[in-house]
Image (spheres, grey):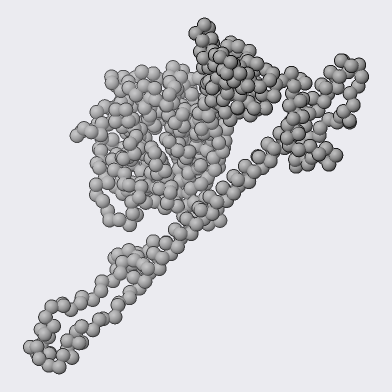
């Protein structure tokens, strides 16, 4: 946004001329001490015309244009929601039509089967063929409408129901199968017995009128005599809660109940097992989707080195080689030209580093973040509200502190909310542990003698926060005990190349729930360690693998590479489930960082092309 030459930003109106004081109007020496004809007073009280300035007019035009764009964006969102609702309703209607056609087909098949059974029964009993007219196999009615009632068969709905009841009686079923739900209610009220013919309610009523015991009382006495039936009753009640099943399932359930307690237990265990399987499957499918680009974050002037999501809000922070950090709210978007995605403008810019910013870590509360730069410093920031006005005045309290301790660029940061600790690794060869609450926050230093090389990335152990893992440019990955500062496990570099640069590890992450460490290598490999040895290694990209992230459920791994692609991997099968081409190359480099949102369905990538992209 261009600035006005006068020093203020666009929209800063020029100061109005100072108005004359409204006090004693007779103080004008040209009029005299209160005398005269009053013409001077009229002249002083005359209102001056309003002064319009070019900056003020530009400010008004820009304000109206922004308001228009915002209203237009709201309208487009509402239109998209309505279109989605229409599509959903159309799908529902189509589904209902398919269901109706399927039910008609089933009824036709049942009618055909009943006629066949009737003919067999008649031939066996009487030895003659039963004349039912021409019995034809029903055709598939999948793509046809519900057929109308034939003209030669003037059956009403009631007559059709009577015919169906007659068919059921012929094959050994009672007519109560037509009223399954009412039968359940009657049985719960004690109004139904085990009789299969005649009116059950009339029989119960006759017993009561003739001095017999009521069904409910008799049922209670039966339970006292046979306590095992109580369990059976409660199993029936538990299964009876499922009132949304179709008639086929209800019929099967009634048969299971009639067949005894063991069948009911078996059915119940099967239902519970199926429910557990569905719940487990739903958890695994949380991120099993096709990710599509939705938001493009354009404002940095150089490569975006790292990014991190807010724990709960649709907000993220990016750091760049243009010396700044930026805060983005994904709910404040502008429709992109010639694209279905949205452009996002930053709502706040953090300025304190005097060189490129290389690393970033977000606290578990989302109230603070830490950044490391080429200027050897770690800056601690208080994150402003996601509704902050981008044009507010500078708030010095946003910068919470500057930590000095490294003597070279800070390449990696990691935060643990369990003990409120921060890890950093630097090109000076050291890994440092920080406690933000202490006056001298640096509490431990590792690899002070550069015995393992230069650290490139760090992370806390997901299973045991008392340990951390660091990767090095020599290809080694080392697990340290944070309490004793001693080396716990060393994964020696096992690269095939004899060149040191080929064994370089760009990123290391720890699985959130399993004792597994994952490393991304310059030689295009991703390696998995069980915190003892290598358990799997694979060539994952066409160029160096630069970044890794594990989803909060620990089911999927996301990797970024200089081959311009993001790949999503199933951690169980170690197979690629999706590949996304996200960024363009700049100086043979492409993707610097990838991240999962901790609680929402967002993933993001940061690239050398000065863009960050968010996928949904």
Q: Position of residue 561 (x, y in %)?
A: 50, 37
Q: Which residue appears farthest toward the left when viewing the image?
A: 33
Give the residue drawn at x 42%, y 35%. Answer: 598
In the picture, measured across the screen, residue 442 lies left or right of residue 321, that is left
Q: Which residue appears farthest toward the right when viewing the image?
A: 128
Give the residue drawn at x 10%, y 84%. Answer: 27
Total marks placed = 0
Give the residue drawn at x 40%, y 48%. Answer: 329
Q: Nearer the viewer, residue 127 or 278?
A: 127
Does residue 471 appear anywhere in the picture?
yes
Q: Is residue 458 above or below residue 256?
A: below
Q: Nearer the viewer, residue 571 or 365?
A: 365
Q: Is residue 329 above or below residue 479?
A: below
Q: Is residue 58 above or below residue 579?
A: below
Does residue 265 appear anywhere in the picture?
no
In the picture, measured across the screen, residue 292 lies left or right of residue 405, that is right
Q: Nearer the viewer, residue 158 or 111?
A: 158
Q: Quadrant of residue 430?
A: top left
In the picture, measured across the screen, residue 285 lies left or right of residue 115, that is left
Give the residue drawn at x 33%, y 74%. Answer: 53
Q: Position of residue 533 (x, y in %)?
A: 46, 18
Q: Which residue appears farthest toward the top when viewing the image?
A: 225
Q: Which residue appears farthest toward the front when viewing the image?
A: 210
Q: Position of residue 418 (x, y in %)?
A: 32, 28
């Amino acid at each position: 946004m261009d600035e006005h030459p006068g020093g203020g930003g666009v929209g800063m109106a020029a100061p109005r001329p100072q108005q004359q004081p409204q006090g004693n109007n007779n103080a004008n020496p040209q009029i005299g001490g209160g005398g005269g004809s009053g013409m001077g007073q009229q002249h002083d009280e005359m209102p001056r015309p309003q002064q319009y300035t070019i900056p003020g007019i530009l400010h008004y035009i820009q304000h109206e244009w922004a308001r228009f764009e915002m209203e237009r964006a709201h309208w487009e969102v509402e239109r998209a929601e309505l279109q989605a609702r229409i599509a959903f309703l159309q799908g529902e209607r189509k589904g209902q039509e398919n269901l109706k056609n399927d039910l008609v087909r089933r009824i036709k098949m049942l009618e055909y089967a009943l006629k066949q059974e009737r003919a067999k029964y008649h031939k066996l009993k009487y030895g003659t063929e039963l004349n039912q007219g021409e019995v034809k196999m029903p055709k598939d009615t999948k793509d046809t409408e519900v057929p109308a009632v034939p003209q030669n068969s003037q059956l009403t709905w009631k007559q059709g129901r009577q015919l169906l009841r007659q068919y059921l009686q012929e094959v050994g079923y009672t007519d109560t199968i037509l009223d399954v739900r009412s039968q359940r209610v009657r049985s719960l009220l004690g109004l139904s017995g085990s009789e299969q013919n005649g009116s059950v309610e009339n029989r119960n009523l006759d017993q009561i009128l003739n001095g017999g015991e009521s069904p409910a009382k008799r049922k209670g006495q039966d339970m006292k005599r046979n306590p095992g039936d109580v369990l059976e009753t409660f199993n029936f009640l538990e299964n009876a809660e499922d009132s949304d099943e179709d008639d086929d399932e209800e019929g099967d359930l009634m048969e299971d109940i009639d067949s005894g307690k063991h069948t009911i237990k078996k059915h119940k265990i099967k239902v519970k097992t199926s429910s557990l399987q569905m719940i487990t499957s739903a958890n695994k499918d949380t991120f099993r989707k096709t990710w599509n680009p939705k938001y493009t974050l354009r404002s940095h002037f150089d490569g975006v080195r790292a990014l991190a999501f807010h724990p709960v809000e649709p907000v993220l922070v990016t750091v760049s080689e243009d010396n700044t950090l930026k805060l983005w709210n994904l709910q404040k978007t502008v429709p992109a030209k010639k694209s279905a995605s949205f452009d996002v403008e930053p709502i706040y810019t953090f300025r304190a580093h005097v060189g490129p910013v290389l690393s970033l870590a977000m606290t578990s509360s989302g109230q603070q973040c830490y950044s490391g730069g080429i200027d050897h410093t770690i800056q601690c920031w208080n994150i402003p509200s996601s509704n902050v006005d981008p044009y507010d005045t500078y708030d010095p309290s946003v910068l919470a502190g500057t930590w000095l301790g490294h003597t070279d660029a800070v390449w990696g940061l990691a935060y643990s909310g369990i003990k409120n600790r921060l890890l950093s690794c630097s090109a000076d060869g050291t890994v440092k542990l920080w406690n933000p609450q202490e006056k001298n926050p640096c509490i431990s230093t590792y690899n002070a003698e550069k015995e393992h090389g230069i650290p490139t990335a760090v992370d806390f152990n997901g299973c045991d926060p008392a340990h951390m893992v660091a990767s090095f440019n020599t290809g080694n990955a080392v697990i340290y005990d944070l309490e004793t500062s001693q080396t716990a496990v060393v994964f020696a570099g096992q690269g095939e190349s004899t060149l040191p640069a080929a064994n370089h590890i760009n990123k290391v992450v720890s699985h959130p729930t399993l004792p597994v460490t994952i490393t991304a290598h310059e030689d295009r490999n991703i390696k998995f360690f069980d915190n003892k040895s290598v358990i799997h290694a694979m060539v994952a990209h066409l160029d160096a693998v630069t970044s890794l992230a594990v989803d909060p459920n620990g089911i999927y791994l996301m990797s970024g590479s200089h081959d311009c692609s993001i790949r999503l991997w199933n951690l169980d099968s170690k197979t690629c489930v999706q590949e996304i081409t996200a960024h363009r190359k700049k100086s043979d480099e492409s993707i610097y960082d990838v991240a999962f949102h901790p609680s929402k369905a967002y993933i993001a990538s940061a690239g050398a092309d000065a863009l960050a992209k968010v996928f949904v």
